[in-house]
Image (cartoon, grey):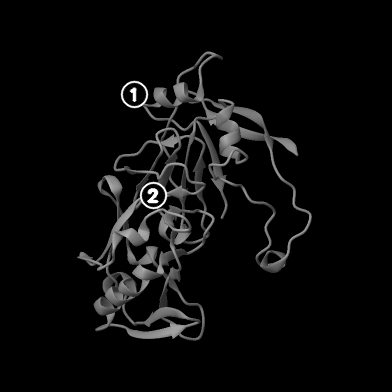
Amino acid sequence: MVDRIGLDFIRLDSTIGTSSAAIGFGVCTYQSGTLGDSALAVDGIFGLGQGPLSPISQLASRGVIPPVFSHCLKGEGLGGGTFVLGEISEPGIVYTPMVPAQPHYNIYLQSITVNGELLPVDPAVFATSTGRGTFVDSGTTLAYLVEEAYEPFVSAVTAVVSPSATTKIIDGQQCYLLSSSVSQVFPVVSLNFANNASLILKPADYLYEFVGDARGTWCLGFLKKPWLTILGDLALKNKIFVYDLFRQQIGWTTNYDCLKAAHVSVPRQRSSSSSAIDMLMLFMLLPQAIIILFLQLSL
């Protein structure tokens, strides 16, 4: 089916305009499994993949938007955040190249450090090959670590917190019971990618509080998975993430207030013959970054 999506944007003179574009989408008439549960049911899924049917690909191929999008997911309270059809331009964003010709947003994870100590893991376990790889996925709630790296990761975290926490297994997950502040006990974790781009994870970025009888219990939000490492929302929250499909790179910056207005590079007025690539290149020529297209998320 085809419908029109409405978009608000801010012009270069700071006035607000509206636009719309036709977009094709699929229709689901039956949901099975957990998607049928009232607590998990969804009205729809806004796909952000690289395939030709994703809204990003459809709009970018017609020059409606540049081939880049960004998000910032608020992790605390009621959630929220910002989704931008464009390139967020903020100081401190680091970029790492994407693995080419992949359906997902695969990137080159090279090593992991816990409390500054390198995990004894062969980097080959993170590499992209048939059925293997490391990718970013905002559609995943927690995160997954390839099984060859999972046990060293758990052991390293446990070694740091053992003087202050009691370890326990809850529903198959590694958890810790403690009475002091999480930030004072748990170490900083660094995921190190190609191009010297490190994703710094504070304890809140890889732990979740267990809701049950055992108050003060925190569990690792990285689950063990064969062959794959997936960075889901737990690791992505409170950070700007930029998916630059033209330059084939993903960027991020940490410790960002996702309820703040995001500054996004926008193109100058272009002729009808200009392409989406021209739009993207013009981003770098502007003296001031302004939001072009945005959608507020209510997560």
Which of the 4 image quadrants contains residue 235? Answer: bottom left
The foreground one among 77 and 84 is 84
Other residues around mark 1 within 10 Å, as few (<14) / some (14–19) / many (≥20): few
* In the image, residue 290 above or below residue 215: above
Horizontal side of residue 107 vs 187, given as left or right: right
Horizontal side of residue 125 vs 299, given as left or right: left
Query: Where is the C terminus found, in terms of image quarters?
Result: bottom right
Residue at position x 43%, y 49% from top?
Answer: 106
* In the image, residue 167 above or below residue 187: below
Horizontal side of residue 43 vs 110, given as left or right: right
Residue 107 - label = 2
Q: Earlier in the sequence, mark 2 or mark 1?
A: 2
Residue at position x 75%, y 52% from top?
Answer: 28
Q: Amino acid at mark 2?
A: Ile
Q: Amino acid at mark 1?
A: Pro
Residue 183 - label = none
| Residue farthest to the right, as pictured | 29
| Secondary structure beneath label 2 | loop
> Which residue is under mark 1?
287
| Residue farthest to the front, as pictured | 130
Q: Residue 265, how many percent across, how many down? A: 41, 30
Q: Residue 126, how many percent across, how many down? A: 36, 59
Q: Residue 3, how many percent across, how many down? A: 73, 36
Gap between marks 2 and 1, in whole Å? 31 Å
User: In this rendering, does residue 237 appear at all?
Assistant: no
Other residues around mark 2 within 10 Å, as few (<14) / some (14–19) / many (≥20): many
| Secondary structure beneath label 1 | loop
Residue at position x 46%, y 68% from top?
Answer: 225
User: In this rendering, does residue 208 appear at all?
Assistant: yes
